[in-house]
């Protein structure tokens, strides 16, 4: 038992665990919509485009996370604006904004001659989370989870049947912007735990794991959070005892869990549910 | 489904409807509130409507004048590209017309969202989203709930009665991806019933579905018309459904080619006199 309790004796480890769990809850809940709406590439883009915001904040001695939040929200809105009205395919809009903003960040870093200042943003440093950071992460977690709860049925409808949503006056575009802003906020908190490069993993992998386990939305949320919590705790212990990057260990735990569930899924352990009885209806009947 | 069973389910639905006659939401999605029908207005009127898609600028519907009276069942018949689906989408407020006007119960499109139920082609719905049939049908109640409010007991009763009426009550807890094509169509019509919409806009509802689904849908639409509801259906082939409609409007290349009063049809239809076949008597008015 001692080895289980030992990491708790250090204040920075306790803060790191708390931060990891809050980030996990935020990302894994939002990640369900990211996965179900096929927005994984978008979350990756938002994570990477925070870089110029962080660099600008660093140069001006502002709060780095505030810079990241502003850059992420601007990116989310920019992608939504470029992709509206199908003038550009969404993945094209994402690719343009993503690569442009990341390139801007790299150019700005290279001009600073001090790359090391930004490494903890690129690969994360959850062990360096202060009490003030923890409060910020908790607020974001509360805002994201509260918003998801409040507009859950509207997000569901605009995802399942956007045309019906539009017909009853529920703007699909408005719901998309809400989701993009929540995504931007979540990404910024995740950057502290696992860094810009690995943030998407916290967003996508637990939710993807959950969709293999169940086909009921409320259980997808439950399993997504459970997998994410488990990964954070395992990664936290691994990081402590093997002295490796906590962010990397958390993401590797996530990926390992996904691998195990995927194998179990292939072996038929999940979804022994109903099958479509009259599939032929789809193709055979002409009316 | 037997007649007795139909009547019983219809009664249950009517009772649930009565319980659900609560006030419309103070926070409607559309922002403009909900308008009641204007006295002695038609259910749906297109006046010299021309619609093109913004992306292609190609005119899809050209100078259409057509009206659908209360209690009337109209079939829009034509091949792919005839403009049927576009006409339905314009009536549902999904596409803005280039010129001309549309009124729904005497109001502008979007002023009475709760009165219009648009059933898209099945391919427009994400059937792999992890929700149950019950959840999907419940989305029909959202227009009556608005932001923040959750479905109550009366809403659940209404959903249950609608599922029974469509003969899919036993599938209520099944995941929507596990439904056959006919079952999916029944679920969408059940959603329109729980929406308590007066005007049904159905896009290819009977395409590639089984005989029993056709009969059930036919009965439901007939019942809907009997109580004053109106139905506008887009179909590429009237086939054996000629007795289920009052009027067939044949379309080609975005224009009305011919209007046919169907056997047993109780109504005439108002169209632009310059466009339909002179061999078909042009009639004005609705009843």
Image (cartoon, helix red, strand yellow):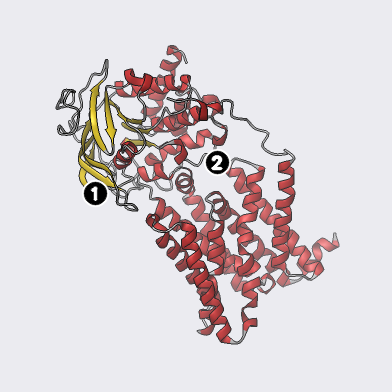
Assess disc 1: are there few (<14), some (14-19) or many (≥20) residues with their C-alpha within 10 Å of its C-alpha. some
Where residue B263 sits in the image (x, y, percent)?
27, 16
**Which of the 4 quarters of the picture holds residue A19?**
bottom right
In the rendered structure, the residue with mark 2 lies on which chain? B
Q: Which residue is mark 1?
A: B98
In the rendered structure, the residue with mark 1 lies on which chain? B
**Which of the 4 quarters of the picture holds residue A188?**
bottom right
Cα–Cα span, label 1 and label 2? 35 Å
Tell which of B160 and B150 is nearer to you: B160
Q: Which mark, by number, is residue A114? A: none
As drawn, the residue found furthest toward the right would be A2
Q: Which residue is mark 2?
A: B128
Q: At x 22% / y 42%, what residue is drawn?
A: B49
Tell which of B277 and B178 is nearer to you: B277
Where residue B103 sits in the image (x, y, percent)?
22, 39
Q: At x 60% / y 87%, what residue is drawn?
A: A113
Task: Give the mark, 1 or 2, whose residue is nearer the N terminus.
Answer: 1
**Which of the 4 quarters of the picture holds residue A15?**
bottom right
Tell which of A36 and A61 is nearer to you: A36
Tell which of B189 and B85 is nearer to you: B85
Front of the two marks 1 and 2: 1
As drawn, the residue found furthest toward the bottom would be A113
């Amino acid at each position: 038992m001692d080895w289980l309790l030992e990491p708790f004796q250090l204040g920075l480890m306790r803060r790191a665990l708390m931060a990891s769990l809050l980030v996990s809850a935020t990302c894994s809940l939002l990640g369900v919509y990211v996965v179900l709406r096929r927005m994984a590439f978008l979350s990756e883009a938002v994570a990477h485009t925070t870089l110029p915001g962080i660099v600008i904040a660093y140069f001006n001695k502002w709060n780095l996370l505030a810079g990241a939040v502003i850059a992420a929200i601007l990116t989310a809105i920019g992608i939504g604006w470029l992709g509206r009205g199908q003038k550009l395919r969404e993945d094209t809009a994402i690719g343009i904004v993503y690569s442009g903003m990341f390139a801007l960040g790299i150019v700005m870093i290279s001009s600073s001659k001090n790359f090391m200042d930004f490494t903890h943003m690129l690969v994360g440093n959850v062990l360096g989370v202060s009490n003030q950071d923890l409060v910020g992460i908790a607020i974001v977690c509360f805002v994201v989870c509260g918003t998801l709860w409040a507009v859950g049925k509207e997000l569901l409808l605009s995802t399942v049947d956007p045309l019906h949503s539009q017909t009853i006056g529920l703007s699909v575009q408005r719901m998309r912007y809400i989701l993009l802003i929540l995504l931007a906020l979540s990404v910024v908190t995740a950057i502290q735990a696992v860094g810009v490069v690995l943030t998407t993993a916290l967003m996508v992998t637990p939710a993807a794991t959950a969709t293999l386990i169940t086909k009921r939305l409320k259980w997808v949320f439950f399993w997504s959070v459970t997998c994410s919590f488990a990964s954070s705790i395992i990664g936290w212990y691994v990081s402590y005892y093997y002295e490796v990057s906590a962010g990397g260990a958390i993401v590797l735990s996530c990926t390992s869990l996904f691998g195990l569930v995927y194998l179990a899924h292939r072996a038929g352990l999940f979804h022994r549910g109903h099958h479509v009885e009259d599939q032929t209806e789809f193709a055979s009947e002409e009316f | 489904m037997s007649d007795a069973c139909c009547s019983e389910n219809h009664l249950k639905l009517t009772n649930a409807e009565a319980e659900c006659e609560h006030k419309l939401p103070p926070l409607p999605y559309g922002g403009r509130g909900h308008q009641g029908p204007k006295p002695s207005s038609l259910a749906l009127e297109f006046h010299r409507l021309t619609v093109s898609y913004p992306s292609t600028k190609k005119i899809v519907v050209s100078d259409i004048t057509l009206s659908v009276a209360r209690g009337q069942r109209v079939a829009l018949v034509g091949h792919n590209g005839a403009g049927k689906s576009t006409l339905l989408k314009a009536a549902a407020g999904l596409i803005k017309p280039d010129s001309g006007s549309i009124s729904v119960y005497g109001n502008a499109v979007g002023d009475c969202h709760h009165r219009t139920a648009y059933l898209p082609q099945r391919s427009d719905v994400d059937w792999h989203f992890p929700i149950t049939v019950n959840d999907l049908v419940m989305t029909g109640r959202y227009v009556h709930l608005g932001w923040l409010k959750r479905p109550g007991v009366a809403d659940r009763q209404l959903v249950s009665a609608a599922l029974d009426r469509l003969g899919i009550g036993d599938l209520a807890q099944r995941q929507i991806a596990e439904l056959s094509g006919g079952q999916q169509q029944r679920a969408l019509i059940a959603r329109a019933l729980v929406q308590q919409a007066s005007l049904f806009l159905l896009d290819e509802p009977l395409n590639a579905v089984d005989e029993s689904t056709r009969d059930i849908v036919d009965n439901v639409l007939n019942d809907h018309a009997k109580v004053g509801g109106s139905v506008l259906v887009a179909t590429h082939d009237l086939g054996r459904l000629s007795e289920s409609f009052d009027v067939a409007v044949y379309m080609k290349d975005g224009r009305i080619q011919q209007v046919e009063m169907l056997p047993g049809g109780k109504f005439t239809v108002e169209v632009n006199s310059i466009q339909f076949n002179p061999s078909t008597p042009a009639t004005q008015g609705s009843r």
